[in-house]
Amino acid sequence: EKLSMLEIKDEHKESVKGHLAEILGFVENIFALETSALKTDTELCTPLREDEPKNQPHIAKEILSQNKHSQDHYFVVPKIIE
């Protein structure tokens, strides 16, 4: 409870403890599986596409029109750094 910064009410602690024990049991079952004979496909990856800029100013105008805080083609946001 202290490490996770969670506040669990006393009446729920036993229930939470049971759920966590069940989850740990599932994890133990996963670790117990024999996986050495499995073939992995670690060499496969999603093919990347080339970045192709698209000049679509109407999309920017549409997005900015949905925000009441925009100015000169930019979003106006509160200043957070002094």
Image (spheres, rainbow, N blue to C red):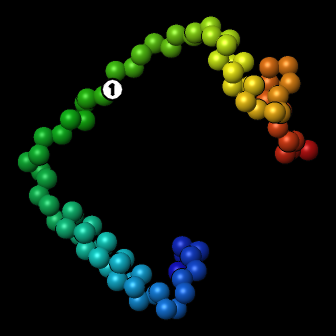
Residue that protrudes farthest toward the top in the picture: 55
What residue type is disc 1 on? Thr
Q: Residue at x 58, y 80 (%)?
A: 7
Residue 70 lies in what quarter of the image? top right
**Which of the pair 57/1 is nearer the observer?**
57
Q: Is residue 70 in view from this perspective?
A: yes
**Which of the pair 66/10 is nearer the observer?**
66
Q: Is residue 2 in view from this perspective?
A: no
Residue that protrudes farthest toward the bottom in the picture: 11
Residue with the mark numbered 1: 46
Above or below 73: residue 23: below
Residue 11 drawn at (x, y percent): 49, 92
Q: Residue at x 58, y 9 (%)?
A: 54
Q: Quadrant of the C terminus?
A: top right
Q: Residue at x 68, y 11 (%)?
A: 57
Assess disc 1: are there few (<14), some (14-19) or many (≥20) residues with their C-alpha within 10 Å of its C-alpha. Answer: few
Residue 80 drawn at (x, y percent): 84, 45
